[in-house]
Image (spheres, rainbow, N blue to C red):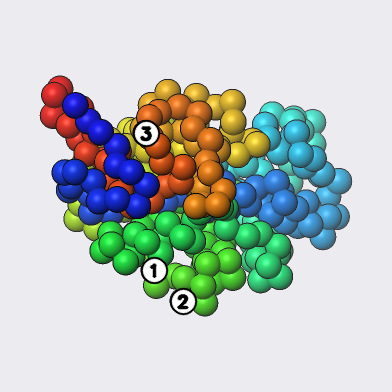
Amino acid sequence: MFRFPQQGATPLAMAHLKALIFDVDGTLADTERDGHRIAFNKAFAAAGLDWEWDIPLYGQLLAVAGGKERIRYYLECFRPDWPRPQNLDALIADLHKAKTRYYTELLAAGAIPLRPGVKRLLTEAREAGLRLAIATTTTPANVTALLENALAPDGVSWFEIIAAGDVVPAKKPAPDIYFYTLEKMRLSPQECLAFEDSANGIQAATASHLATIITITDYTKDHDFRDAALVLDCLGEPDYPFQVLRGEVGWTTYVDVPLLRSLHQQWTSTLSQG
Ligand code: XBP
Ligand code: MG
C-alpha cells in the first residue's frame, strides 16, 4: 500500500521524477486582479478608451487566456456595439504592448509577491537536482519581470526553459505549450509534474498527460479540478500550512520535494496499473 512520508523524511521508495513545470499567472504569483487587470485598464485609459475592467468582469474575461485574445473576447461578448476601426488587429496589438509596459512597471515596483511556498519549493527542487521549467500563456517579458523582481535577480536562470506567449499558436486550454516544453526538455510527461491554478491550465496539462497540482486563487476556486493529483489553497510553508481541497497528503502540511516524489510515484503506479 502507498504511504506518504513524514514531513521532511526521505520517502520509502523514490519515483523517477525529473522535472517540475510551472504555470505563472495565478500559480507562481496572484497576478491577475491587481496586476494584469490594472495594466489593461491603464492601457485603455491611455488610449482614450472608456473600457474599464472591474474585478467581477475580469473574472469572466479570464475564461480566455492571453491578453490579445482577451481584449478580442471582451469586444465580441461585452461590446458588440462598439464601432470597430478598420485596423482592429493593430489597435489590439498596440493596446497589448502598452499593457505589457504597465504590467512590467508594476512588477518592477514590487507590486506582486510570489505566492506562499513558491520560492522555498523552487529552492528545494533545485537543491534536489530537479529540473525546472515554465509553461505559460503570458508574454515572455512579464515572466522575466516577475522572476527578477519577486524571485531573485538571477531568477530567470533557475529555469531550464521558459515557454511563454506566442511561441505556440494555440494558448491554454490547448496543450501546445506543454508539448513544446516537454519536447525542448526531451522528457516524457510521466517524468514531470505540472503546477497550475485554473481550468484552462489543468485542461492543457492533462491533455499533455501531465499529473497536475493545483493551487487555487479567488478567481479559480470554483473551477473544475477533478483531474488534479492534488488541489490546495497554496503550497504552504513550515509555519503556514496548506489546506487540502482534494487529494491525499498524509501528515504533510506544506509541499516539499518528498511529497512531490510520493505523489508522482503514486501517479505513475496508477498509470502502470492501467
Ligand atoms: C495567464 C493569462 C495571461 C495573462 C495576460 O493564463 O491568461 O493571458 O492574464 O498575459 P495562464 P498577456 O496562467 O493559464 O498561463 O497579456 O501577456 O497575454
Ligand atoms: Mg494560471
Q: Kindly give the residue lying farthest to the bottom in the view shown.
A: 153
Q: Residue at x 46, y 60 (%)?
A: 120
- Whether residue 44 is situated above or below residue 56 in the rendered picture: below
Which amino acid, by three-letter code, is at mark 2?
Asp
Which residue bears the numbered disc 2?
154
Q: Separation of disc 1 and disc 2 at Cα?
A: 7 Å
Image quadrant where one finds the C terminus: top left
Q: Separation of disc 3 and disc 1 at Cα?
A: 30 Å
Which amino acid, by three-letter code, is at mark 1?
Trp
Q: Nearer the viewer, residue 150 or 183?
A: 150
- Whether residue 79 is situated above or below residue 7 in the rendered picture: above
Which amino acid, by three-letter code, is at mark 3?
Gly
Tell me the mark number nearer the camera, choosing from 3 and 1.
Answer: 3
Which residue bears the numbered disc 1?
158
CA neighbours of label 2 inside 10 A, class few (<14), some (14 to 19), many (20+): few
Contact between marks 1 and 2 (CB within 8 A): the answer is yes
Image quadrant where one finds the N terminus: top left
Tell me the mark number nearer the camera, choosing from 3 and 2.
Answer: 3
- The reply to whether residue 268 is in sight is yes
Earlier sequence position, callout 3 versus callout 1: 1
